């Protein structure tokens, strides 16, 4: 178990929040974590329809041109995380762990593997068997991608994270080439099972799996009121 055992994981539920606002918050919280002014923190949220391009993304992965997407109400962001192009939108549970890998004694591959395992375990709770694909970060169900992952580290503190497709509008993924793979298909819990948990239930289950796998002793949940976090 990682060295963070008996530490507390702060969990902050942001609801539906614009991507740019959440990114600014992540960067600010990482600075606080680097200065030991904040404990490890997990942000849980949804985004409005948003396309993000990671460091390894190429323009060929944009099936629909950015200007057309913006005209349709999508946000488009080029960001510092690893990985390829991805989509975020309502019905997708997004988690951003802002944690110190050094304090947990973890390298990047192990950390990414534990994030993937938390999603595999959560989806297993729902009765959905999922797994990994060699060389492709994320989680797959019946050959289709159901969860994405991509992180960025500075001085061993992470931002960005994971996204699980509970019940998003799957047609929105047609605007991109998921994972940069021409024949990649995307799915959701709703598409695979015909039903899905509430967002609140999903947040609770995912948090517990992350707490266990990353070795935290307790979880402290914060609510957001007028942009401020309250215990």
Image: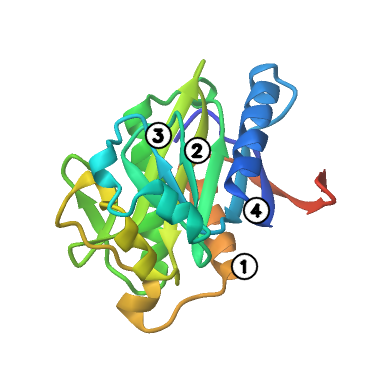
Instruction: Report the disc number at residue 17.
Output: 4
User: Which disc is residue 200 wearing?
Assistant: 1
What's the CA distance linking mark 2 and mark 1? 20 Å
- Alpha-carbon distance for marks 3 and 4? 26 Å
State which quadrant residue 120 falls in. bottom left
Estimate how packed mark 4 is, as few (under 14), some (14 to 19) or many (20 or more) residues with alpha carbons within 10 Å: few
Dot 3 or dot 4: first in sequence order is 4
Distance, label 1 to label 4, CA atoms, is 15 Å
| Residue nearest the viewer, comparing 106 with 91 | 91
What secondary structure is marked by label 1? helix
Q: Which residue is mark 3?
A: 111
Distance from disc 2 to disc 4, alpha carbons, whole Å, reads: 14 Å
Relative to 122, residue 127 above or below? below
Q: Nearer the viewer, residue 69 or 139?
A: 69
Q: Nearer the viewer, residue 171 or 199?
A: 171
Binning the other alpha carbons within 10 Å of mark 2 as few (below 14), some (14 to 19) or many (20 upward) gives: many
Say which residue label 2 marks. Answer: 160
Kindly tell me whether residue 137 is visible in this rendering.
no
Between tags 3 and 1, which lies in front? 1
Q: Is residue 7 above or below residue 210?
A: above
Q: How far apart are the two marked residues, 3 and 2, measured between alpha carbons?
A: 13 Å
Q: Earlier in the sequence, mark 1 or mark 4?
A: 4
**What is the distance, in whole Å, between disc 3 and disc 1 at their CAs?**
25 Å
Which quarter of the rendering shows the N terminus? top left
Q: Nearer the viewer, mark 3 or mark 2?
A: 2
């Amino acid at each position: 178990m990682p060295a963070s055992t008996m530490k507390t994981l702060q969990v902050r539920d942001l609801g539906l929040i614009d991507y740019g606002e959440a990114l600014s918050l992540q960067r600010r919280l990482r600075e606080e974590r680097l200065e030991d002014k904040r404990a490890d923190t997990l942000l849980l949220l949804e985004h409005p329809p948003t396309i993000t391009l990671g460091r390894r993304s190429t323009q060929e992965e944009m099936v629909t041109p950015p200007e057309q997407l913006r005209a349709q109400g999508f946000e488009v962001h080029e960001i510092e995380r690893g990985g390829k192009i991805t989509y975020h939108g309502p019905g997708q549970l997004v988690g951003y762990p802002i944690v110190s890998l050094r304090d947990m004694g973890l390298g990047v591959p192990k950390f990414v593997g534990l994030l993937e395992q938390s999603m595999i375990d959560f989806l297993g709770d729902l009765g959905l068997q999922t797994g990994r694909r060699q060389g492709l970060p994320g989680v797959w169900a019946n050959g289709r991608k159901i969860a994405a992952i991509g992180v960025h580290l500075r001085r061993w503190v992470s931002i960005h994270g994971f996204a699980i497709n509970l019940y998003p509008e799957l047609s929105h993924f047609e605007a991109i080439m998921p994972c940069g793979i021409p024949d990649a298909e995307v799915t959701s819990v709703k598409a695979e099972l015909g039903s899905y948990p509430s967002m609140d239930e999903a947040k609770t289950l995912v948090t517990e799996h992350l707490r266990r796998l990353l070795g935290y002793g307790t979880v402290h949940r914060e609510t957001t009121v007028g942009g401020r976090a309250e215990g």
